[in-house]
Image (cartoon, grey):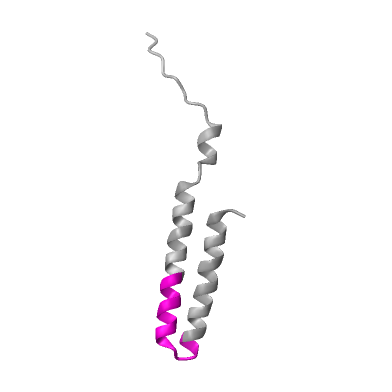
Amino acid sequence: MNWERAWMIVAALLLISAAFFVWRNNLSGAFVTAALGSCAWFLSYRAKLQAPGEDDDEEEPVEETDEE
C-alpha cells in the first residue's frame, strides 16, 4: 500500500468520525477530527505530488530537427 492511499483512508475515517461527533452534538470533537481529516487529505495530496511520475518514464522525448 502506498502512502497516498493510506492517507486517503485515514482522511475518510476521520470524516466519518467527525460526522458521528456532529450527530452526537459534540461540535468541538467534530471540529478537531475534521481538521485532522483535512490534514490527512493534504498529506495524501503531497504524497501524490512527490511520487515519481509513471507516465514521464514511458515517453521518449521527441528530437526536433531543422530540415530545409
Residue 65's image quarter? Answer: top left
Picture coordinates of residue 2, whole percent (x, y):
58, 53
Left or right of 60 in this view: 32: left
Residue at x 48% of width, y 53% of height: 47
> In what quadrant of the picture does the C terminus appear?
top left
Picture coordinates of residue 28, whole percent (x, y):
40, 85
> In what quadrant of the picture does the N terminus appear?
bottom right
**What's drawn in magenta, residue-wise?**
22-36
Q: Nearer the viewer, residue 52 or 67?
A: 52
Q: Residue furthest bottom?
A: 25
Residue 25's image quarter? Answer: bottom left
Q: Residue furthest right?
A: 1
Picture coordinates of residue 58, whole percent (x, y):
56, 33
| Above or below: residue 21 compared with residue 62 | below
Residue at x 50% of width, y 68% of height: 11
| Above or below: residue 33 compared with residue 56 | below
How many labels, in total? 0
- Report the magenta stretch's main SS: helix
Picture coordinates of residue 48, whole percent (x, y):
48, 51
Residue 44 included in the magenta stretch of the image? no
Residue at x 45% of width, y 76% of height: 33
| Above or below: residue 54 compared with residue 46 | above
